[in-house]
Amino acid sequence: MGKVIPKQEGLDHSVDFLREGYLFVANRRKSFQSDLFETRLLGERVICLGGEDAASLFYVADKFTRQDAAPKRLLKTLFGEDGVQTLDGTAHTHRKRMFMSLMTKENIDRLLRLTGREWKRIKQTEELVLYDVAQQVLMKAVCEWAGVPLARDEVAKRTDEMRLLFESGTSLGLTYLQGRKARSSAEAWIRQMVKEVRSNQLLPNEQTALYEFSWHRDESGELLPEEVVAVEVLNILRPTVAISVYVLFTVLALHQFPEEAEQVKQGQVTKTAFVQEVRRFYPFFPVAAARVKTDFDWEGYTFTEGTLTLLDLYGTNHDSSIWAEPDLFVPSRFTDWKESPFNFIPQGGGDVDFGHRCAGEHVTIAILEQVIELFTEEFSYTVPPQDLSYSFVDMPSLPKSKLRLTDVK
């Protein structure tokens, strides 16, 4: 007789999940004194996991599948349908290799040159909202990097579509409908480009996402459908624009933790360590989802085929059994950090080259290191009084003011 998984009483806890957001799983792990428990969300039995050992289990390919794991509302907004996030096995490995082919040092350096150029084009101004500016900086840079033509008069519209893709998935009402509309519009925009590439009307440079993805062949040797190419090109554009959330928190951390910021300026702590602590400390993704692929036992608990399973990303990054004083902002903790693909998982865990860990993780780190350099060495600015609080309920979580800066030079 196996052990019984701790179970949350009640018919459904979807409202609790929306009410508690990033802390939903962590709160129950604490109350149950267990790294796994059972609950019900949207009428379905769900197992929630957290911690390093649970994360290492969650990414075992023959135990969990990503197929049918993400809610439809996220496929209709955030991810798109039939994208790399929904694949498993050889299909996932083959498609992931397509993404990783772009993540060479030379290619990342090229993206950094483009983002640096866009940051330096910001004019001196009395006031700007950093979140809004960062999105346009990243959108213009990543479109050029990905070989996607972006007309000047389309920058605001297309940037806003990318924002809606990652902001609307957990929203209700009008915002969610705007996200659905943004997904349809953005996919149609890229789909037309794919047609033009394949008819030689549009000739993007090789080693760009639009070129590579348009001519990529699946395991059977067939070109991907235009609709799938559009989804995957957006899986380059959207996550890069979403780094604006981390840009916001990076500059906020430089402001709120001046001693730690000074350590970076003096070279006592590396920019990389500061960036990693930003990614650990602040909320980004709350959970990752998968389904049990086949019945198995783990630590005496039985997992049944088809069961939806959620991995606690935020809670694992604040787990006191992994991190000393996890609620303090301490970049130096990454100086002698023993790296593991399962104890630090802000953008997912596992292997970045072949697994389900975010393909753009190295891009995120590089862009944020550049932001630290720019905002400590090249830009001067003032942070006026404003509401810098952020909610653990809103997803993504953002400072209320989206960080207003004045006297920017």
Image (cartoon, rainbow, N blue to C red):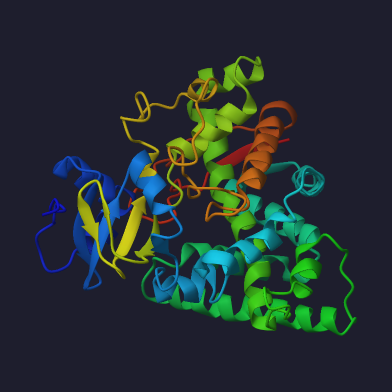
Q: Nearer the viewer, residue 52 or 42?
A: 52
Left or right of residue 312, residue 366 in this image: right
Note whether 149 is above or below 393 in the view shown. below
Question: Residue 371 at what x, y percent from top left?
Answer: 67, 37
Q: Nearer the viewer, residue 84 or 53?
A: 53
Note whether 190 is above or below 112 in the view shown. below
Left or right of residue 6, residue 373 in this image: right
Q: Quadrant of the image for the C terminus?
A: top right
Note whether 110 is above or below 173 in the view shown. above
Q: Nearer the viewer, residue 249 or 334?
A: 334
Left or right of residue 312, residue 243 in this image: right
Question: Residue 264 at what x, y percent from top left?
Answer: 62, 21
Q: How many marks?
A: 0
Answer whether residue 266 is visible to the viewer in this image: yes
Tell me the residue at 50%/26% (across/down): 338
Quarter occupied by residue 125 = top right
Question: Residue 14 at what x, y percent from top left?
Answer: 24, 65
Tell me the residue at 48%/62% (across/down): 167
Q: Nearer the viewer, residue 8 or 185?
A: 8
Question: Residue 52 at what x, y percent from top left?
Answer: 37, 39
Quarter occupied by residue 192 = bottom right
Tell me the residue at 69%/53% (across/down): 138
Q: Quadrant of the image for the N terminus?
A: bottom left
